[in-house]
Amino acid sequence: MDEFSRIYDEKNRAYGITGRYLDKLNEINLASLHPEKEKKFGDMINSITEKHYSPGELKRIVFSELKTGFKTTKQLSDKFKRSPLRLLDVLSELKRENKIDYIKTRRKSLWAKKFRIEEFLNNQKRNILSRISYKNFTKIGSELLFSRKSISARFKIYENDNSIKKHGKWWKLTAKGKNFVLGVDESGSEIK
């Protein structure tokens, strides 16, 4: 019982257990020790319409949920039975703390831990830059399932970070870009 939050009422000689701890008691079938109490407990559990989270608890749970990968606000909203606006508040707070970030793909915002976003963007950049020899945004985009405009926008980003350089009508990889595509940094060490 030490893991449960409880309040003992001496007058009624009873423990008051609330919140998510009721779910834990339900999981371990504590009420099955007495048939009448099992039915009453089951009726009470089934009557609960919404879980209540203590301050900061929803934020911790959402952060741990993002360990599994990318999630949309809608997916998180459905899982935690909270409005998308409430989840956006929590996600924005985690973003301000620099723990998570999001990317926009095909009209969706995908939230994940910061390192997963960086891995995703690096893989995307490597895929795009390895196809620079195609010399056609549409061809690159169709192979990677991106629009021509998305590829064009990414080329501008990569040009700003000196991975590619305009050469005539098309771009060429710079030394930094070549190393990135090959997976090595300036010192020759492998990029993970």
Image (tube, rainbow, N blue to C red):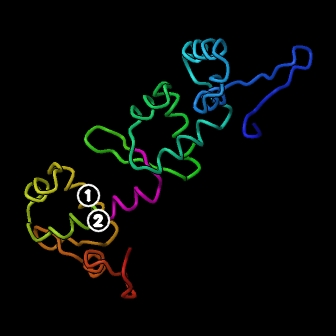
Residue 52 within the segment the image draws in magenta? no
**C-beta proximity under 8 Å, tags 1 and 2:** yes
Numbered disc 1: secondary structure: helix
Which residue is tagged 1?
A: 154
The residue shown at (45%, 28%) is: 84
Main secondary structure of the magenta stretch: helix
Which residue is tagged 2?
A: 158
What crowding class fits label 1: few (fewer than 14 Cα within 10 Å), some (14-19), or many (20 or more)? some
x%, y% of residue 174?
A: 25, 78
Residue closest to the eye, 34 or 27: 34
The residue shown at (87%, 14%) is: 12
x%, y% of residue 20?
A: 63, 29
Residue 187 versus residue 151 in the image, above or below: below
Residue closest to the eye, 10 or 113: 10
The residue shown at (45%, 60%) is: 115
Residue 129 versus residue 47 in the image, above or below: below
x%, y% of residue 76?
A: 44, 35
Furthest toward the right, the residue is: 11
Numbered disc 2: secondary structure: helix
Residue 90 versus residue 13 in the image, above or below: below
Magenta segment boundaries in residue numbering: 111-122
Amino acid at pointer 1: Arg
Amino acid at pointer 2: Tyr
Q: Quadrant for the N terminus, please.
A: top right
The residue shown at (50%, 30%) is: 80
x%, y% of residue 9?
A: 87, 20
Q: Is residue 47 left or right of residue 136?
A: right
